[in-house]
Amino acid sequence: MANIPTTERLARALEELGDPRLDEMIKRARQGFYDDYKSPYPFPLLKLKLELQSAGYTWMVNRVIAGEFDATEEEARQGFYDDYKSPYPFPLLKLKLELQSAGYTWMVNRVIAGEFDATDEEAREWFEKEGRHLILGEGGKEL
């Protein structure tokens, strides 16, 4: 089960309930809507808990609270909080908000202090691979 992505584990758990009212939730689960790192929402698991509760699945809420559908360490390492690899426009802000909501204010201070910012080398690597084209346009030549 460890190599099954969190999004798929959640979708399968919802499917096991056999409730057609959950079809949209299952679809959103597979799309990463409730995923710690892929969701466009700052608190996707809170959204999941609220939706499960309103559907009458309070015992499933307990599974969410217990961390059963939290992203794995490997998924976290894929760069979702990285300045240059993240699908989010402000990945470190997302990290700060999630740490704050979890009560890890001491970690929030480390984020604010820039401890997890990309290095100059990472910035140069990103610029050479993707940034030059994005910033300078098709020709990639400095103005």
Image (cartoon, rainbow, N blue to C red):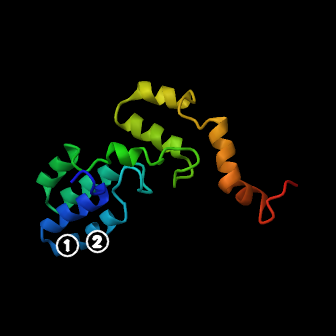
Within the image, what quadrant is residue 38 found in? bottom left
What is the x, y in percent for residue 9? 24, 58
Amino acid type of the residue tagged 1 in the rendering: Arg
**Residue plotted at (42% across, 44% down):** 77
Q: Is residue 54 above or below residue 79?
A: below
Amino acid identity at mark 2:
Glu
Is residue 32 shown above or below 128? below
Quadrant in the picture for the N terminus:
bottom left
Q: Residues within 10 Å of mark 1 (few under 14, many from 20)?
A: few
Looking at the rendering, which quadrant does residue 140 occupy? Answer: bottom right
Q: Residue furthest right?
A: 143
Query: Mark 1 sits on what residue?
Result: 21
Q: Position of residue 49 (x, y in %)?
A: 24, 53
Residue 7 horizontal/vertical position (percent): 31, 59
**Residue visible at 26% across and 68% down in the picture:** 26
Name above or below for residue 94 compared with residue 7: above
Taking the view exactly as shown, the residue that stands out farthest to the top is 106
Q: Is 52 placed left or right of 35 in the picture? A: left
Tell me the number on the disc at residue 24: 2
The residue located at (21%, 58%) in the rendering is 52
Q: Alpha carbon of mark 2 to alpha carbon of mark 1: how far?
A: 7 Å
Residue at x 50% of width, y 27% of height: 110
Residue 95 spot, x, y in % from top left: 46, 40
Mark number displayed over residue 41:
none
Which quarter shows the C terminus?
bottom right
The local crowd at label 2, few if under 14, some if 14 to 19, many if 20 or more residues have their Cα within 10 Å, is few
